[in-house]
Image: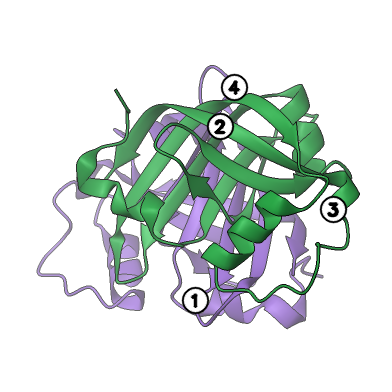
Chain colours: A green, B purple
Amino acid sequence: MSVIPGSHADLLERPLFCHLATLRADGTPHVNPMWFLWDGDCLSFTTSTRRAKYRELVDRPDAAVSINDPEAPYRYLEVRGRVERIEPDTTGEFFDVLAKRYGLATDGPVGDAPQRVRIFLRPTHTTSQ
Amino acid sequence: MSVIPGSHADLLERPLFCHLATLRADGTPHVNPMWFLWDGDCLSFTTSTRRAKYRELVDRPDAAVSINDPEAPYRYLEVRGRVERIEPDTTGEFFDVLAKRYGLATDGPVGDAPQRVRIFLRPTHTTSQ
């Protein structure tokens, strides 16, 4: 059973930006917009092993995302969860899946493909309005 | 000197929703969309003393906000900072300032005005793209 409320599942299905909050090494929050994919089980993100986000999620796997509806901005979904696994994406294949989902044209593998990873976040709780 | 980059100051001046990340009692992140006002010095938010957000910011004053440009969603500003002070807003006056900024019609003080507070967050760092 997914914890995602059916009333707000469209916010995960549409190619909206989420705002991903993670924990920095000093325990303070870090939040920025991210692409994501929802497979009905986990949210997944592309990042690179050179980014702060990657190090933060390896060291402190608790995270939360906020997504609001651009057509009805008071309507939102917060998903809290934990990183379940991180897979290499050294061909950039998952990056391309997201690029296509978000309407970005690609021409060959993303430049930093050798460092690319796919991060899987399993939802544990949600809040919504 | 403000830490806000001039190139992205419009994201604080326009009535956009920010996604405010705070720390829950167990140290995990909490993030959701919020109204805000930027006075050139601090970001401020309206909440109620009955909300989790209030308790979180009283207990752990480190917070971060993410705002992206709806017309150019890869353009974003993250502001990290600390709660500097919290003022009562028991008349709902500050709530009304924000309601007007965000185009919401009000008819008398907000229902929970007696519990309303204005939270001032002083920026310390930013990231942007």
Residue A85 lies, with reference to residue B21, above or below; the image says above
Q: Residue at x 21, y 50 (%)?
A: B113
Q: CA distance from mark 1 to mark 2?
A: 25 Å
- The crowding category of the residue bearing disc 1, from other C-alpha atoms within 10 Å (few below 14, some 14 to 19, many at least 20), is some
- The crowding category of the residue bearing disc 4, from other C-alpha atoms within 10 Å (few below 14, some 14 to 19, many at least 20), is some
> What chain does mark 4 sit on?
B
* Discs 1, 2 touching: Cβ within 8 Å: no
Q: CA distance from mark 4 to mark 1?
A: 31 Å
Element under disc 4: loop
> What chain does mark 2 sit on?
A
> On the image, numbered disc 1 is attached to which residue?
B70
Q: Amino acid at mark 3?
A: Ala
Q: Residue at x 25, y 37 (%)?
A: A5
Most foreground residue, B40 or B32: B32
> What chain does mark 1 sit on?
B
Q: Give how far across and how far down residue A48 sits, in percent.
A: 81, 47
To the question of a shared chain for discs 4 and 1, the answer is: yes
> What chain does mark 3 sit on?
A
* Discs 4, 1 touching: Cβ within 8 Å: no
Element under disc 3: helix
Q: CA distance from mark 2 to mark 3?
A: 21 Å
Residue B105 lies, with reference to residue B27, above or below; the image says below
Q: Amino acid at mark 1?
A: Pro
Q: Earlier in the sequence, mark 4 or mark 1?
A: 4
Element under disc 2: strand
> On the image, numbered disc 3 is attached to which residue?
A113
What number is the disc on residue B27? 4
Q: Amino acid at mark 4?
A: Gly
Most foreground residue, A88 or A60: A88
Q: Amino acid at mark 2?
A: Leu
